[in-house]
Amino acid sequence: MRIAAFACLLAIPLAFSGAAFAQQPLRSAVDGTFAPHAFPKLDGGVQGFNVDLFTEVAKRMGRPITIDSASFSGLVPALNAGRYDFLAAPVTVTAERAENLLFTEGYLYTAFQFGIRKGSAPITGMDDLRGKAIAVNKGSAYDAWAQANAAKYGFTVQTYDSQPDAVQAVVANRAYATLGGNTVVRYAATRTPMLVPDFVIKETRAHWAAPFRKDNVELRNAVENVLECMKRDGTVAALSEKWFGVKPAADDAENTPFPGYGVPGMPGYDPTPHALTCG
């Protein structure tokens, strides 16, 4: 009797220890200046699509979550240093990054998209840009693409200090179109009635996914399982429509649970089938 009672007493701290571990916050971070994915709230903290997305992921895992706001350039080093469990910031999956990080499957497709002034002739192909001015955010990937392709397609490039400034150049008729990320252009259009999301450069499409350290396979898989359940029940698509102002297509990443774990065709991808148990 005494031995059994003593064993029970020993088990109590272990049980509490396991419960405490299950409740340990997931530690994550975003670039808090990247609207509408993450940007400041008037009463403090950050809001946006990625904040809502991973707050819901953590809730379904039964874990609290902390989401810091930091400069994007410092996020991956902080992840690798162990400060964060994963990054809630949207990170484009490239082969180079996937060699050094472990990614979930994509929850959004990112692609380069043009925004034009309401009433302007829509862009049907790259030849429509000939003789036009394209406004871009200085130093961005979109600036680099525009500078590299201006001569090829016969357009000129106007650079601005921010994407909102590039949008205003289009609204004011100083430029024919602005080039940016598809989600940012769509969001800008919800805030600027004279801006219309237009032509998407399909060959630039890539997955936006959550990165983890290479040794954190178990947590990557657990988060991906929840993301797939949220795709199946429409939660990711609903958040996308809320923040970007456009209902995702049936074959968009918001509605597509991909096979295996990770991004198909990229380093770190695990093609092993897995069954989902969604609450």
Image (cartoon, helix red, strand yellow):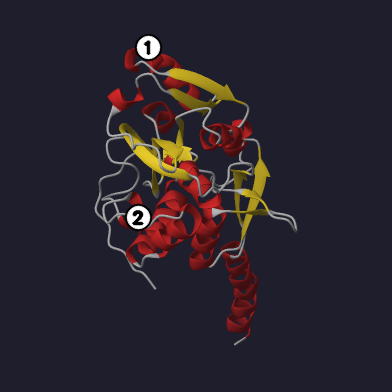
Residue 17 in the figure: left or right of residue 57: right
In the foreground, 209 or 225: 209
Label 2 crowding class (10 Å Cα cut-off): few <14, some 14-19, many 20+? Answer: some
Which residue is disc 2 drawn over?
248
Pinpoint residue 50: horizontal percent, then vertical percent: 53, 52
Pinpoint residue 254: horizontal percent, then vertical percent: 36, 54
Write the residue at 32% across / 64% down. Answer: 232
Specify the quadrant that holds the N terminus.
bottom right
Q: Which sits earlier in the primary sequence, circle 2 or circle 1?
A: 1
Q: Is residue 211 visible?
A: no
Which residue is disc 1 drawn over?
151
Q: Residue furthest right?
A: 43
| Of marks 2 and 1, the one in the foreground | 1
Residue 122 in the figure: left or right of residue 18: left
Write the residue at 54% across / 36% down. Answer: 167
- Tally the marks: 2
Residue 63: image quadrant is bottom right
